[in-house]
Image: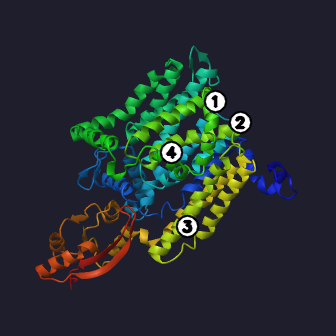
Amino acid sequence: MTARAFASRPGRRDLIAWPQAILDAAALSHGRACALLVALCLVCFLPGLASLQPMDRDEPRFAQASKQMLETGDLVDIRFQAEARHKKPVGIYWAQAAFVGAGEALGIPNARTTIALYRLPSLLGAIGAVLLAYWSALAFLPRRGAVLAAALFAACVVLSAEARLAKTDALLCACAMATFGGLARAWLGRADGAAGRTLGTATVLGTATVLAFWLGLAVGILVKGPMVPLFCGLPALVLSLQARSGRWLQALRPGLGLPLTLLIVAPWFVAITWKSGGAFYGEAVGHDMLSKVQGGSEKHWAPPGAYLFAVFGTFWPGAAFAALAAPFAWAHRREAGVAFLLAWIVPTWLLFEIVPTKLPHYVLPLFPALAILAVLALTRGALDPERRGARLTAGLVVLIPVGLTLGLSAFAWTQDGTLPWAGLPLLLAACAAAFLAWRAFARGAAERALCLGILASALLSPAVFGLTQPVMAALKVSPRLAALRDRLPCAAPKVASLGYREPSFVFLIGTDLAMMDTAAEAASFLRGDGCRLLYVEDRFAPAFAAAAASAGFGPTQVGAVSGFNINGGRRVALTAYASIPDPTP
């Protein structure tokens, strides 16, 4: 049966036409479009924001450093416990500290160890990235297509993950999207004058567009150093070489923008240079950046081509449709809009493939361009199910929800001895929506297929983060250890750990958590004055028992926790011992 015949069957048209109806409604105004996108973002990003434990190791490192800014009042230097953390600039730490400080002012209990407060900049950054992707897409597509492209980006897996993590990448993506939209308008204005009055080869852009570009660049530098300049600078270079002129960049008014950028970023860089004596640059450039370029930093090595393989998971559900748009992109590579999208995607993608250190979120700012390219191909009728291999490629949309449903069920069963019953109905619904997306594409309804893929993501996110993750006790080792501390009959005990050194533990227990190097040190700590609590990982238990016996005392066990350390990928078990003074008569 053809797609046209299927759509025209009595009683079926209203049932299957709702995606188009939603797009039609959103396309009536920018306000409606933005409202729909924000609603989609909240569905995809909010579930699990508070219940997801601090995710080792990067997230609690950022959160702990922000917490120490509040504890010390030092808003220039960045530290994790006593160690200088000179890997990234200060932007994300300021944002997190501001939200936590506001939470304290509003009376939120335990605000400094409430990880959800530290995640709010990432949540807002992810929503901002989607709205800026919509604004950017309007340079290439009519409003209806721009909404669809931004929604496809909002639905992608890696953005959903980064929106829930107190790190730099969601906010970085928003900054990159601000430069993307400004740069695109400058380039497309050069081509056809549509963005404003053409003067030679440069277009006079509106002040709002110019400010969006330079503010995105400036804030991006404060968030993650050279990354936003890389994301916008590389395509600007490629396009200028293609045009044999860089005069089109004058539309961005660098005479205004460069001083503004320096005014925003220079004060902190001057302050950290003075305070660290230049050590910040040695660590950030000489160690952090060069270690990623020269080898697989922190065990994150992967071969060239890894991003191309992983994108079908990280950019799900849009990756399959972006792959189907590749022939269209090649055929129309000389068109101004397609040329810009390819210049944004290809050079930076190749650079990241060459760099040995690879993490899925590194290529996140390239995904909106993939989404726009997919929708652009859709509007030209280029997502053709009759093309060889097209149906098979579209079938990749089904793999992620099915794989997550099976994987989460297997993990819950092996680690906690149960199934994720609360999340299973939505997990299965996401699988069904993904299957319907594939079937719609196979029947020639490509736009409906994209909408159903977005629906699958909107079902999967609450299922995984909102309903399944909270009941997986095996994943929550650090929160359960912190709960043992909170049940002690004495207030503010001194706490130490032997073996277990995860940053999430430091964040939840406190900056003064002591890390013991040997069993003898741990036994000596427990015998000290006042109320004390010691956690001993089981692989150190025999040595600790021998050290305690040698010291002539028997430690009092107050609890035990076992679970799965997601960072190390292994089971861990710890026993808690306490020294509790007799209460004063």
Sequence-earlier tag: 4 or 1: 4
Query: Is 156 placed left or right of 434 in the picture?
Result: left
- Other residues around mark 3 within 10 Å, as few (<14) / some (14–19) / many (≥20): few
Residue 308: image tag: 4
In the image, is residue 143 above or below residue 503? above
Q: Nearer the viewer, residue 314 or 88?
A: 314
Q: Is residue 579 left or right of residue 569?
A: left
Can you identify the residue that label 2 sits on?
Answer: 380
Q: Are marks 4 and 1 in contact (CB under 8 Å)?
A: no
Where residue 90 sits, quadrant-wise, is: top left
In the displayed orientation, state which residue is furthest to the front: 388
The picture places residue 460, in percent across and down from the top left corner, at 59, 60
* Residues at discs 3 and 2 in contact (Cβ within 8 Å): no
Q: Which marked residue is nearer to the observer: mark 1 or mark 2?
A: 1
- Which residue does the numbered mark 3 point to in the structure image? 406
Mark 4–mark 1 Cα distance, whole angstroms, equals 22 Å
* Label 2 crowd bin: few (<14), some (14–19), many (20+), radius 10 Å: few
